[in-house]
Image (spheres, helix red, strand yellow):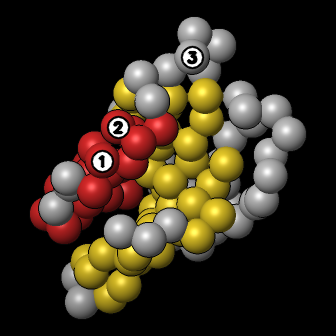
Amino acid sequence: MQANPLRYGAPDRSEPVVHEIPPMLYGGEEVPLRLQVRRAEDGTWRAKLIFGSEEIGAAPATAEIFCATNENDLWQSVRDLRDHHFRDLYRSIAE
């Protein structure tokens, strides 16, 4: 899964960085997906999914449901999700 950072070179690694990930299909329409990733004070990597193209804060989003000891493991956990997982998460927070 390719990720395209929306913001490059965040000077503070604890500052969240938003990555676009491939959209999902829901109800016959494409829903944009973004992943907001940050490094916590304890060194763990945390991320949440943001659905849609609205501004962050206005768009439906999960809590920081992804957590890993390193960035590669975090991305692997995102890659392991299948389309039905994304749809179920979206349905649980957007409807």
Vertical placement of residue 3 versus 71, above or below: below
Inspect the image, locate mark 1, and give the three-letter code of the amino acid beneath it: Gln
Q: Nearer the viewer, residue 41 or 70?
A: 70
Label 1 and label 3: CA atoms lie apart by 18 Å
Tag count in the figure? 3
- Name the disc covering residue 73, or none: 2
For mark 3, what is the residue?
A: 43
Q: Contact (CB < 8 A) between labels 2 and 3?
A: no
In primary-sequence order, the first of circles 1 and 3 is 3
Label 2 and label 3: CA atoms lie apart by 13 Å
Question: At x 77% / y 59%, what residue is drawn?
Answer: 8
Q: Position of residue 63 (x, y in %)?
A: 44, 34
Inspect the image, locate mark 3, and give the three-letter code of the amino acid beneath it: Gly
Q: Nearer the viewer, residue 60 or 83?
A: 83
Inspect the image, locate mark 2, and give the three-letter code of the amino acid beneath it: Asp
Q: Contact (CB < 8 A) between labels 2 and 1?
A: yes
Vertical placement of residue 86 versus 30, above or below: above
Badge 2: how crowded within 10 Å, few (<14), some, or many (20+)?
A: some
Give the SS element for disc 2: helix
Q: Is residue 39 left or right of residue 14?
A: left
Question: At x 16% / y 61%, what residue is drawn?
Answer: 82
For mark 1, what is the residue?
A: 76
